[in-house]
Image (spheres, rainbow, N blue to C red):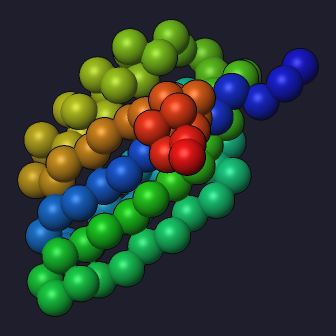
Amino acid sequence: MEKVQLFITVIGEDRKGIVARISDFLYKCEINIEDISQKIMGSYFVMMMLVDIKDAGKPIEEIRNGLNSIGKELGVQIQIQHENIFKMMHRV
């Protein structure tokens, strides 16, 4: 079966536990992290993940809702975008 990839972006004030909390949620949903990049810019935490949801135990809306809840809990903004939408937006 082919991969089903999403981009997850996280932006907010830096604090302990952001990566751990999001990674734990993804693990529990059986979502594989394909690539991850994170950086502290001033006092802000910025992270981008490429994940594969083909084996996810939850539908995409439930994943989105779960990440939104985590974002509120941690005080960060979390967005997800399907790879196909990303490709279409950045196509020349």
Is residue 30 something that shows in the picture?
no
The residue furthest right is: 1
* x and y, in percent, of residue 79 in the image: 31, 40
Q: Quadrant of residue 54?
A: top right
| Depth order, front residue of 54/22 | 54
Q: Quadrant of residue 47?
A: bottom left
| Depth order, front residue of 26/89 | 89
* x and y, in percent, of residue 61 in the image: 38, 13
- Answer with left or right where residue 58 lies relative to residue 72: right
Residue located at (56% from left, 63% from top) = 36
* x and y, in percent, of residue 58 in the image: 53, 14
Is residue 32 depicted above or below 88 in this figure?
below
- Answer with left or right where residue 63 lies relative to residue 11: right
- Answer with left or right where residue 59 lies relative to residue 31: left
Residue located at (51% from left, 54% from top) = 49
Residue located at (67% from left, 42% from top) = 32
* x and y, in percent, of residue 83 in the image: 57, 35
The total number of labels drawn is 0
Residue located at (14% from left, 44% from top) = 73
Is residue 85 something that shows in the picture?
yes
